[in-house]
Amino acid sequence: MLNPQMVLFLCATLFCVGLYGVLSRNNLILMLMSLELMLNSANIALVAFSRYWAGQGLDAGSFSGAHSGQFFALMVMAVAAAEVGVGLAIIVALFRKRHNSDVRAASELKH
Amino acid sequence: MRELLQKPEFLLLLVPLMPLIGFLVNGFFGRRMALASSGAVACGSIVLSFVIATSLFVSLISKGHTVQSYSFNWMHVGALDIHFRLLADPLSGLLMMVVTGVGSLIHIYSVGYMGHDKAYWRFFAYLNLFCFAMLMLVLGDSLVLMFLGWEGVGLCSYLLIGFWYTHKANSDAGKKAFVVNRVGDFGFMLGMFLLFWYFGSLNYGELAAGMREVVQPDSTLLNAACLCLFVGACGKSAQIPLYVWLPDAMAGPTPVSALIHAATMVTAGIYMIARLNFIWVHAETALTVVALVGALTAFFAGTIGLVQRDIKKVLAYSTVSQLGFMFMALGLGNFPVAIFHLFTHAFFKALLFLGSGSVIHSLEHTLGHGNPDSQDLFKMGGLKHKMPLTFATMLVGACGLAGIPLFSGFFSKDAILYAAFERQDALGLVVYALGLAAAVCTAFYSFRLIGLAFFGKWRGLEAAYAHADESPRSMGMPLFLLAIAAFGAGYLWLPAAFGVHFTPFADLLAPVWQQGQAFLRAAQSPLAMPVEHSHEALVREWVNMLISSVVAVGVSIFAFTIYSKPAGLERARKLVEGGLGAPYRLLLNKYYIDEIYDITIVRPIQLLSDVFFVIFDVIFIDLMLVNGSGLLVDLSSKVARRVQTGVVRHYLFAFVVGAALLLVMFLAVL
């Protein structure tokens, strides 16, 4: 049985790495990848808790039961896939206009 | 339907309803209707109303009881429960007859007089609306309904004075009438509030019942209420100090002057006091004020009328003066005599106005519409050859106004002077002296008008005289009928001194005064009307009649000899330029009252409104509220827009910080 604290620590680390990547990278592709990292850290936490509650003997039939964490992880994956689809499309469009994918260049939308 | 039409409860509702329907038809569809049908709707509705009113009045006289209409619950607020019900008792029935009768004649007259006007339909719509409002004022069975009509006639007066609104002077005159009347209406409302506070009702019947139940009436409160109501009467009936609007109201079309500003609306104040006579008899102080104000107004306005050049202005001041006579009678406690003078005055003054309108109408053909020369007496003369019917009828009216014996004004005015004469105290003496002086003025200006307009040589533009012609038949017929009424109305109440007991007018109205007179007789008040005439009283009445006859005839002949001949006119002109110059100018400028009001009231109010305009409108609202809020948004957005950098990372950072803060807050709450 995995120690949930260890798993949470892993999640937090991954999340912070992702967050740092989102905030610090200039390349939009890298920012998107960091975002994926944050989402996946959340997925790990969801799956880990699902497993943890199952170990505690909670009934699988109830709504907050052992498997709901796994379902949520699947949902997050689906949303993440959609998000990547949209994000990549934006990046492609931006790249066609500017021939780079630097986030600093796209700052016309102000005032 | 036929059954319904035989019920007086229903018929009474139809009396004011007819002109209202006429107003709605002309008001909504008049613009698209032919002139003839527009006039037919207006005249038809009021004539129909007159026919219904006559049938009701006949049954009222013959059966001797009052007619009440069906009652509707109009308002119900707390203790206040107002019913909409019409009431035709002898007093309101009589006024109903005057309004619909004189109103019908003036509507028919207007068909000719207004024939060339573009806004023909609008004129008739207003005139119908006026008749509706006036009938509501007269027939309503509570002060609230009277007030409804009171405001309605004020509105119509405003609309009709400013009827030719393209001239600024006309719309100004309308505005003046409206504003001055609002001052009076405020007093009227205060009086109503006081009465409601005291009696808990505003229904005439309930007020009378309340008055009977009160053992020791609070005379201070009743005096205050009556004085407040009198302020309202002063406004509507043009008494000092609120008379200034009526002469200016002559800016309206002449039929309007005849109907509204001579025969009906301006007598609303007299009607109101007579209606509430059972309360007024308890307010002796207020009655004294009424008598003095009336006498002063009668004299004061009479003197101004002596020198006016405008034919309608002469009649306007004469109306103010005659209304003063009516208030004199009311103030002396002789209510029926006041109503009698109201009755005769309605005929002869409407006749005089319509006659002057006929003169103006025929001169306007040549001089052009709105030309002041068509109303200037000093640019007329010798018109009796050109307009024989107008001359003859106006002569009857002038004789009535001047109080020439055996004409209607003689009977009614004489009765008022006699009432003052009989008082035999200081008040009676003052009122009598002022009244007699006013009667002198009346006789003078009446025959000055006749002499200047119809006799002597023509003094205006030659072409105007050449084309002057008798007015069309639609105008001649009302003149003729009114002349008959103006002559005959006085014979409905012969003075006791004649030795013939013929007083149908007084007998008809007797029940109206019953309650008040019973109180006065029990209190042995000098205000009580005499029941029987002693031998000495008859002698005094003869003496009084002789004095006023001699005065009326003498002054009339005097004025006529001066103004009907060129030589006399020349003498008068020299006199005015010489020794009498100062008083002449004083009178010609109406004692400078308009100027005094302008300096003491109009200008300060304008100044105050300018100050408020600058402080509240310009500074507070425009500058602080409107521009201030705009400026605030502008400034704050100048600061706030710096947040929107366009750099995605800044937004992300703010988002993360916000999420972190929320998390912290969430944890802190937990």
Image: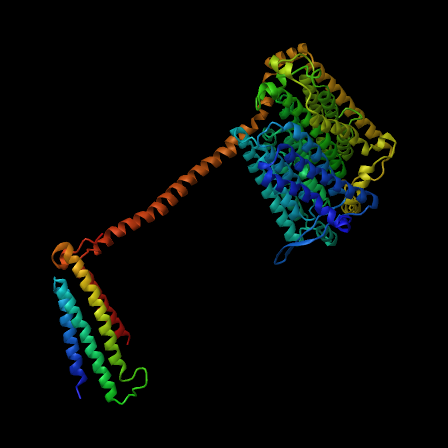
Residue A15 is situated, as x and y percent measured from the top left of the image, at: 16, 73
Query: Is residue B603 left or right of B201 when viewed as pictured?
Result: left
Q: In this rendering, does residue B564 appear at all?
A: yes
The residue drawn where x is 69% and y is 27% is B475
Note whether residue B309 is visible: no
Furthest toward the top, the residue is: B567
> Quarter-wise, where is residue B316 in the image?
top right
Work out whether B606 lies above or below B588: below
- The percent coordinates of residue B12 (x first, y second) are 73, 46
Residue A29 percent across, percent down from the top left: 14, 64
For this view, does A111 lie left or right of residue B65? left
Q: How many numbered discs sit on the rendered protein? A: 0
Q: Nearer the viewer, residue B571 or B649?
A: B649
**Quadrant in the picture for residue B421:** top right
Give percent across and percent down for residue B590: 59, 25
Q: Is residue B193 left or right of residue B330?
A: left
Residue B291 vertical position relative to residue B7 in the rendered view, above or below:
above
Residue drawn at (12%, 64%), measured in percent from left and top? A25
Q: Residue at x 64, y 16 (%)?
A: B467
In this view, B561 is above or below B414: above
Viewer-side residue, A11 vs A34: A34
Please tell me which residue lies in front, B305 or B505: B505
For the C terminus of chain B, give its image quadrant.
bottom left
Query: Front-most of B525 and B457?
Result: B457
Residue A62 location, quadrant = bottom left
